[in-house]
Amino acid sequence: MNGSKKTGIYLAAYTVGASSNYFFVKDGLSYSPPLIFMSLRYAIAGASLLIPLIALRRFKPFMNLDLFLLSLFTTLSTGFWSFGLLYIDPGTSAVLSYTMPLFALPLSMLILGERPGRSNIIGIIIGFLGVVIYYLSFLGSMKLIGAILTVINAFFWAMYSTYFRKLGSRDPLTVVSLQMLISAAMLLIPSFIFGDRLLMRDKFIIDLLGTGLMGGSMLFLLWNLLINSMGVSRAVALVFLVPALTIAMDYLLLGMIPTPLELIGAVVMFIGIYVSQRPALTNAATSSP
């Protein structure tokens, strides 16, 4: 199999897996409170990476402040994302989640000392203009709460992505497995405090395995395969197929049609994100936590 065909398979699998993940989580939240569901998701995803690492004798555990912060930002990101999904559909969640690069650029300036170019700044302005347009379609509805929570999730996803780069000298599989297991524990603690309970149903098990494996560890591995085969810049540009496919799945599976204002806002957002990543796209983008 030639390189271009492999890349196409990786991209297709990543896009389908990432889009499907929104539906696994949305449905799973009908059986479980957000925090305990996300805790179980990360426990499964982390264990599925940890077991082969131990078997291959590649696992070298460590703990430092950067790993703790990485896990904390993962916990906050997924917490806001899952609570946001209680109010909005998967397509809207995907569109707003993928505003992450708009936050990643200024954060990389503050945390990593990187300097943005003119196109980066123009792109950020255009991108946030698109966010404002998108928000106008939610005024006066409960979806506005979900939209706000989801954008907060995008901010913490950007924080996670930036701190992931600070651990670049470490084995990425080890970092991700530890980060997921620590995040699982962080999410489980408030679940016990609030007395969260879940309904154990066959459909819930499918949702949990879908988001833990297909939407968790598999996405991370596919993202790294994409980076290795096509480079960061092309990979980051093409992952915007994820919200596009999720919107299409919204229509096919749920019969939900985006409003003209939502479509305009999404297009402006993605133009801004694309421009903000040129000419040097940020290396901070990683698979969604």
Image (cartoon, rainbow, N blue to C red):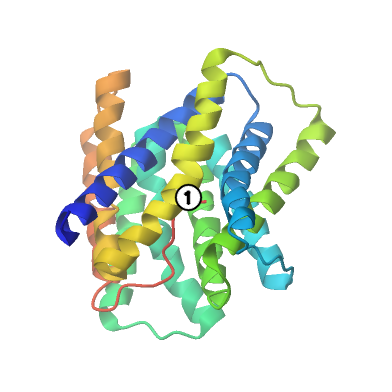
Seen at 53% across and 42% down, the residue is: 81
Residue most extreme to the right: 193
User: 149 left or right of 246?
Assistant: right
User: Residue 278: x, y in percent?
Assistant: 24, 74
User: Residue 205: x, y in percent?
Assistant: 56, 22
Residue 132 in sight here:
yes
Q: Residues within 10 Å of mark 1 (few under 14, many from 20)?
A: many
The amino acid type, in three-letter code, at marker 1 is Val
Residue 258 in sight here:
no
User: Residue 138: x, y in percent?
Assistant: 39, 35
Which quarter of the figure has residue 63? bottom right
Q: From this view, report whether residue 228 is shown above or below residue 152.
A: below
Q: From this view, report whether residue 274 is shown above or below residue 269.
A: below
Which quarter of the figure has residue 247? top left
Q: Which of the two residues, 251 or 142, is positioned nearer the viewer here?
A: 251
Q: Which of the two residues, 241 or 125, is positioned nearer the viewer here?
A: 241
User: Residue 169: x, y in percent?
Assistant: 55, 78
Q: From this view, report whether residue 141 is shown above or below residue 60.
A: above
Seen at 37% across and 72% down, the residue is: 282
Seen at 28% across and 29% down, the residue is: 249
- Looking at the rendered structure, the number of numbered marks drawn on it comes to 1
Residue, disc 1: 151
Seen at 28% across and 50% down, the residue is: 10
